[in-house]
Every structure is written in C-alpha cells, then in structure tokens.
Amino acid sequence: MTLGRIGVAATLPVLIWALAGAAMPTYPPTAQSRASGVPFVREVDRGASLAGLSVFVAAGLEQQTVATSGIAALVAECLVRTPVEAAGGQREPLRDAIAALGGNVSYAVDDRTAHFYLESRPAELPALAALLAKAFAQPNFSGPILSAARATLTQRSNEGEKNPLRVGVQMFKESYLPAGSAFPDFGTSASLSQLGPQALADFFARTYRRGSISASAVGAATPGLAGALAALTQALPAGSVTAPDRPARVLPANPKRVVVRRDVQGPFVVLGFAAPAPKDADFGAMLVLETLLSSAFERTSATTLNLAEKPVGALYLYETTPASLVVYVNGSSGLDPTGGLREIGLVAKSLASKRIAPDELRKLKAQTIGAFVTGVTTLADRSYLIGLFAADGIPNGSLDRALDAIDGTTAADIERAAKRYLQKYVVAIVLPRDNPTSH
Amino acid sequence: MKRSLLGAAAAATLVVACALPSHAAAPAPPAAAPDLGPNVALGHILGGAGTTIVGHFEGAPVVAVELWYRAPSGGFGSKPRSSLARLAAQTAASSKPLVGDALGTVVQSAGGKLQISAYGDSIAISALVPSTAARAVVHAMSVAFFAPVLSEDGFRAAQRELATAAIISGFDPDAAVRDALFAALFASGPQHEAPLGSPKDVGVLSFDDVKAFATRAFRAQNATLVVNGAIDGNVLSDLAKGRPASGEDAAAESPAASSIVASPAPVHHTFEESATGYAWIGPPISDERAATAMDFVADYLFRPDSGIVARELARTDPGASANGQFITLRDPGVFFVSLSGADVTREQNVTLAALRALKTPLGAEAFARARAAFEYHLLSDVQTAGAVADNFGWYSVEGNLAYAPGANGTGGAYFKAAEALTPEFLAQTVQRFLAPEAAATATLSPPSKKPAAEGKST
C-alpha cells in the first residue's frame, strides 16, 4: 500500500531535471580557514544585507551529568543575560547591548556544542562578536540573572512537555543516547532548581575553552570578522575539552516500548532508530529513507501539511551523537497508531529485502534534494549546518556534500542502509492523561 | 464558531462608508514603474494587465514562486461566503489539469512546499522549491491558476483539507480575536468576513460556488506572479497563456468597497481559553511615513523577545502571549493586538500603559536604539527568498509595490521612510491613531461552568 503510492507517474519537474542533464541545485561555495587557530568556515551571499556568525563551544549536552541536567542551556542563557559594557560605557545585558547595535544574539545546545548565533549588518558584526567576548570573559551566574534564566528554561521545558513529538523523541533519546546527551535540552524544572552559581561557574570553566571553539559565517561579506573571531577566542582560557567516552546503548533486537502520559490531545507514537553521521557513506541513503518514510503514508493534500496535520513523519537527527532517525505516528490525525506502527515495521522490512525500482529511486532522490534545500534557507540554519558539517570533517562544511550524497545514492545503498539501521528500534508511546492537569 | 453574534453588534453602531470604488473602476493614470532594485525585473503577463516580478536572490538554492490575486475572501457576491476564496484556490491546486499533474503533486514531487493563504481582500498561492524546479513549477502554477480546470475530485479533496484546517484554526486564540475585531471594525466589505471560517462554513460551499469564484478571480489578467530566488535563465519561458479575455475580464479586479464602523461596540465571545484584543483603524498604504511609524510601534512594543510589552509579560507571566502588528492595507490599515494568558486584565493594562507612554516622544537614545532594532528586524524578516516574495505579492495587491520592505534593499522606499522617522512623529502617530477609546475590543472567555450539584459543594 505504501510503497506503491510512491511509484506515482513521473512528474514534470523530475522530467525537466533529467532532461537538463541532472542539474542539481547548489549552494554558494564555502571556504575553510583558521582564525588564530580556530576552525572557521564561511559562505558569502552576494547582495545579502545581513551576515550571521555561529560560534560553537564544546559545552553541549554530552558534558552534563545526572546531577547537572540542563546546565548547558542554563549557562548559555545566563551568558546572553550577562551585563557587558556597551557603547557609551553603560553596562547592560549582552542581548540588549547587541540589540542596541542593530543585531541579535541567540543560542542553542546540541549534543556536542552550545552555539551562539550573532546576526546583523556586516559593518556591526565584528562589534557584536566583541560584546560576546566580554560576556565570555566575565560571565555572570549570580542572583537575579540565574533566577531569570532558570525561569525562562523552566517555561521552555514545560512547553516542551505539551509537544508530543518532543516528548516522544526525548523518551527515545533516554533509551538510546549516553548520559548527558540523553537529557532534555533545557533540563527539567526539578533539575534546573538544583543548579546554583557554583555549578554553573564550574561547568563554564571546564567547557568554555579556547582550544575547542569553531565558527561559521554566512551572508554578506564581513571585513574584519576573522580578526573579531580571533579576539573572541582570547576571552576564553587556553585548553581544550575532552568529549566523554560514553557509547550509545545497543538497540535491542526486540523493540523496547516505553509509555508516558502527558497533556496531549491524542496518542502519539515515536519509533527511534540508529542512523549514520553526515560523514558516513550511508548519509545520502538515510536522507532518502527519511523522505520515503515521511511521505509513504501521506494523505492526499495539495498543500504541505504541518506537524499537527501529518499522520506520519520522519526526522533524521544527524546533529545528535550518535545520529538517529525518528518516525512518528500522530494519533490526533485520525490514523490508528497501532496500524501505523505495524505499517512502518512492514515498510522497514520490505526496504531491507527488496530494491527500489530505478524510476522510484530517481523521484525519491529529487524529492529528498528538494526537501533538503527548502528546509535550510535562513542564515541561522545555514550557518549552523555548515559549522556542523565542517566539525564532522566534511570538506569546507559544504551543504552540497549532502546533495551529492543524495544524488549518488543507489538502490543497493538504500537496501543496505535499511538493513543496517531500520531493523532495531525503540517505541515511545505518548498517551493523553486520563485527567488532564491544569498546568 | 460564534460569528453570528458579530452582525448584531456591528449593525448597532454608526457605519461610515469608505470612499472606495465598488467595481470596474476607471483605469488609473499611468504610473512610473516602481524601482525595485537592480536584481528585480517587473513585467506583464502576455502584455496584459497581470504583473510579473522576477527577482534574483543569492543564498540557498531555492526559488519562491507565488501567485497573488486581488479577490474578496468571501467571494464577489453581495452575500459573502466565508472560506470561498481559500477553498477555490485549494481546489485549483488539487485538480489535475488536462495535461500534466496537479500543482500540489508537481510541488511535492520536487520536494517543495506549497501553501495557500487567504486574506480579506487577497489570496496567495506560494511554493518554495529547489531552484532547478522553478520553471516547471511556474508552468504548473500558471496552468492551474490562469485558466483553472477544476475537478470534482479536486474539490472534494480540497474541502476535506480545508475542514481540517478550519478545525485546527478554531483552537487559535489569535485568529479568533483577529476575526472578531475585523468583523467589528468593518461593517461590510472584504475585511469584515473571516478568510477561513468554521468547518461548517467550508461544508456548505458547493462545487458551483467554487467554479464561479475561480473563473472570475483566477485569471492571468488579475494575477501578480512573483518569482524570487536563485534563478537561472528565463524562468518564465514556460508560463501558461491563460484564457483570452474581453470586457471586464481584461482588467484586474478593482478593490472592493468597505465600510468602517466609527464606534465599534465591544465584542464578547466564548472560546476555549481567555483572550482579548484591540484593533484600531490606521493609515492607508499610500501614507508611507505613518504606516512605517505604525510598524515601528508594533515592533517596539510587541516583537517577541525584544518588545517592551512582550518582555514585560514574559517576565511576570511566562505563559502569557502578546501579538501586535500593523496590517498594511490599501485603505485603511489596521493595528491589531491580541493577548492571551492567565491574567488578560493585567496584560491589557500593560499594553495600554505602554501605548500611553508612546504618546510622549521617546528620548533620543531610546529612539536610536529602537530604530536600530527595528531596521535590523526588517532586514532579518526579508533574509529569505520566500519572505521577499511574500512582501512583493502583498504590497503589489495592496497597491504600493515600491513600498514593499525588501524592494531595492536598504535603499528602497520602506527603509527611507524608516530612516526618516522621528520621536515626535512617532508620538503624533500614536496620538492620531491609537487612542484607547477609538479601539475595537474583543474579549474571549471560556464557557461558564455549570454550578456544582447541590449537596456536593465543599
């Protein structure tokens, strides 16, 4: 039922693509260098009005322990609130000082890094980096700043608990990823309440090290950025950070099931699989499998469905370490979760035992390339991704590597990847509470 | 939904007719082509009334392909039919043409994204696709929408999809507040009707309703086609011709008449959660300086994470939500605020106090900071090909394309207007347009609970 639907007759864009000599979309070229020893990859968009700079610090989730769950995000949140001396001499929170210059600072944490993203017109970007350097040099984890940061993350954590996909993915991560990476990005209200100024200072001192920084920039050409980046790194102490040696858990041969109840509208099922890293030979095949699993159960719709409407979707989490693939079944969409779960299992088995026909493969690859490029368009997303790819050893962090990997995928690659990755999984089931709580 | 309550409230208040043409206005005098910058080419579809805007935009290898039509969301008849424009567009995108695939299928096969957005007086069909698929999608979109051949299968699929979207929208307090406020502010005309009604509204529309609307609205002569992104070669080379036109069909639709309610009565509705909102009549799109000042106010007070009101509410009630924006329309524009959370009364007080404070000119430093932030936000909001295409489409349909943020980069009319703002003019604009007593207000409250049964109280 499902694979057959993918084999719809060839469509016009695919034909044109083929007739044009398999022309591929390409990103502007990237270049890699070192700024005072810091790996720095950049991509210039001619005509862009803004430039974005991502600074990656080796202070990600993997550096957390059971006692410090949430600390990676809490330190980063305190840093954007840390008072710095701004233009005019007054001290104000980093984010306000940056806004006053006509820019923005944001941050996110992944398994390996806390990454700070600065964005402004190119003329101001070096000054934004200088302000971030001041916060790095004198972080403030005390008093009202810590309380406000904790309140912000607690709110985000509580909001996340209402998102069934987020809850399901988190349950899978806890079953699969090693400690640290397995913890929720923003911690929990309980874990955050245990983290005091000294714990934050200790974490900062251990993980914000000059030797483990990398950076990426996208957008308008920015003179002076490499120099500003070099100065930024000098704000941190020398030394590097060692990644903890905690392998992922082995997925069981028989699917493990975990069940929780939350304030959600309907049942939601998440299947978590292991997946290859971007530098792996199976990367392209897994991107194609993501598209296939995401669209295999698509109900007919002219317009693109959002998460709340999609009955089944797939997300390839290649930024996690190790990477993983999740496939979800949204019971609120009207699809029976049990039936959806069974269908996914059948598709996974079928993909591992039967090669996709050439026509189907060509269409799937076109769809996958399109989904990739239309999913990564903002400066922030592109900056993050080229930084992630560069750190993973992909030459120049080029996103074209992903497109090439998709384009080069064969039916045998898909079969091999399905056999290797899609046969063992964890099932996380999120059910509505019998009596929804008011908070 | 409780839209039936709105009619009574609006009818009880004074109605002032806007000086807008009703249909088939006399041809406008020829205007100079707007300066959209060196990377944007303006043209006409087959030399007719339809407009093409093609922009080269470096960055991600994607192209936004958008078709915009001026058409009332409730249709052209004297009795508006809620959701009609949206359903007609969804049907056209779902219907398989005589040759080739339906637009939705073409976009999906390219790995792209297709959205249909209905507004009071316009509708947008927007695709974001890889650059290599742009020409094929331009072709498919023009086939589907320049001379739509609608199928009953497409209609049924569209009706199902839209009914689902209506259910989801029914839980959105912002949408509920906005619909209530617009219905209160406008006694009639395209802004009075909710662009997307209830599932029942969608269900009562017939295939004939949809065909009649599509025939009149979806014509090349009434279209603004925007193609913006990493374009290579002549992206319009496969543009479909559309059907020949004569008489009224040869021209674009004229803006529909609207009636403003001078003193709108407060509106109260029941909803799943508590929410409230305000709306004020603002300047028309032609008053660029005042319209930009209204955008500035919305940014300064309500921008998520940085707005004065947004931050104050986040500090004291993390669950609160404040959304404020100036909706730039042909005439008039509307400043709209919606608030939801545990204590909407407090949120109202914070909002009104912030607006009162803006009646006094900001100090020089505060204004400089706010303007730097505003200009950055503008640039950040137009950093993708899709965002720029959205602006070109919206501002074209509303009648002032040259004023679109993103047109001609930071040298365009919008940024010039932003740079020309002063604290004094900002304060004057707030005094002129945003007086609390002039606002339409809407309050949404959960249905009152039934009293506890006797003998069970504690």
Image (spheres, grey):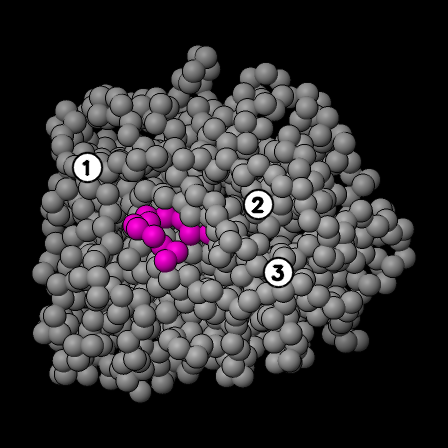
**x, y percentage for residue A163?**
44, 62
**x, y percentage for residue A366?**
25, 65
**The one of A320 and A347 positioned closer to us in this rendering:** A347
- Marks 2, 3: nearer the viewer: 3
The dot on residue B17 is none
Q: In which quarter of the image is the N terminus of chain B?
A: bottom right
SS majority, magenta: loop
Above or below: residue A3 compared with residue B337: below
User: In the rendered view, does B212 fall on the left or right side of A274?
Assistant: right
- State whether residue A229 appears in this view: yes
Tell me the crowding category of disc 1: few under 14, some 14 to 19, or many 20 or more residues within 10 angstroms, Cα based.
Answer: many
Q: What residue type is labelled 2?
A: Tyr
Residue that label 3 marks: B250
- Marks 2, 1: nearer the viewer: 2
- When asked about the image quadrant of residue B9, the answer is bottom right
The dot on residue A41 is 1
**The one of B78 and A423 positioned closer to us in this rendering:** B78
User: In the rendered view, does B49 fall on the left or right side of A407?
Assistant: right
**Residue B228: within the magenta?**
yes
The dot on residue B395 is 2
Q: What stretch is highlighted in magenta?
A: B226-237
- When asked about the image quadrant of residue B109, the answer is bottom left
**x, y percentage for residue B452?**
75, 72
Q: Is mark 1 on a helix, strand or loop?
A: strand
Q: What residue type is labelled 3?
A: Ala
- State whether residue A195 appears in this view: no
- When asked about the image quadrant of residue B103, the answer is bottom left
Q: Mark 3 and mark 1 in contact (Cβ < 8 Å)?
A: no
